[in-house]
Image (cartoon, helix red, strand yellow):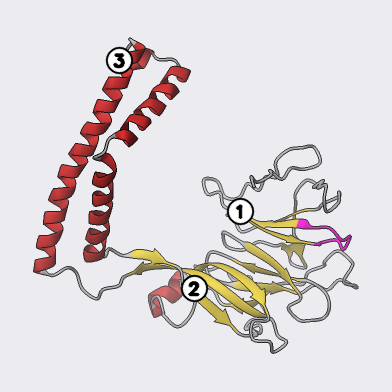
Amino acid sequence: MPGKLITDKDDQPLNVEGHPGKKRSTPFAADWDGDGDSDILCGDSSGSVWLFVNAGTKQNFAFSERQQVSCAGGPVKRYGFSQPVMADWDQDGKSDLLVADYWGSIVWYRNEAATSSASPSFAKPVVLIEPYTDEREKKEGVKADCPFRNFRFTVADCDGDGLLDLVIADERKNASRRSSGPTEAEHAKIDSMKKRNDVIAKELKAIRDRAWKNNLKDFKKDEFDLTEKEMADLKERVLAAIRKDDRYRPLQRESDRLNERIGILTDPPYNVSWLWFARGVRPVKDDADTKPK
């Protein structure tokens, strides 16, 4: 079914601004105030964590204006692209806050509220997973035995031992399937496939240009004089004409296959995401306020 836009009590979209020019928010639904309905926590690209309290019901949302989540040391603020998760990490019956960030750290804010039904009161953060700083990368490289950066994670007792675990997806740069570049024979194959692809590209362009020219005639005017509605109509006709051309799809499929084979042979560096399981992680540092360099 189509999604429904989440709005506040004034029927305005919930907005998390984040870092100028970089917009990526990560929401997490949790009963923040213990009233039985779901509120929304949201991390943003600047590293902040925001709260939208649902003053309505489970069925009829009425979210408040956003407010920044704080801890004993001030606002919760990480180092870009924060992802909040609420879970009872220390198993004292109260939901704590865990936050991941761009640098590959996960920190834990212990909930020190008096009861589980009270609004959370978070302590200063402690580190569960240490950040992969630039300095660490220069020293250690992109290691294959631990997560790298730009985490997304979830929390669960995966092994049934009664302790919560972390399941992490990281982002790893410059991965490659090969230890060396293409051989001389492979270079020859690549050149041959690229030449064939150039021929296909010209044939596909000719089909598109012909469909455009033939359908534009029906409007009896220059394309720059078309109204917005006429231009939309023209584009629909052109697309339909291209689809009817028996050569277009086979040529496009051949081009896709050639590009895939070229990519396998050249194998340029690319980013991948590896999954990690961290069993019952305990804090490694008391202070998580050192900014990565």
Pointer 3 residue: 217
Residue 8, percent from left and from top: 77, 43
Label 3 or label 2, whichever comes before in sequence order? 2
Measure how far apart labels 3 and 2 are at the Cα level.
60 Å
Q: Is mark 2 on a helix, strand or loop?
A: loop
Residue 218, percent from left and from top: 34, 14
Question: In the rendered image, which quarter is residue 136 located in?
Answer: bottom left
In front here: 259 or 106?
A: 259
Between circles 3 and 1, the one closer to the viewer is 3
Marker count (numbered): 3
Task: Write the start and end of the magenta stretch as one range.
Answer: 31-39
Name the residue: 45% across, 83% down: 145
Pointer 1 residue: 25
Name the residue: 86% across, 51% down: 57
Measure how far apart labels 2 and 1 are at the Cα level.
21 Å
Q: Outermost residue toward the bottom? A: 161
Between circles 2 and 1, the one closer to the viewer is 1
Pointer 2 residue: 132
Amino acid type at mark 2 = Tyr
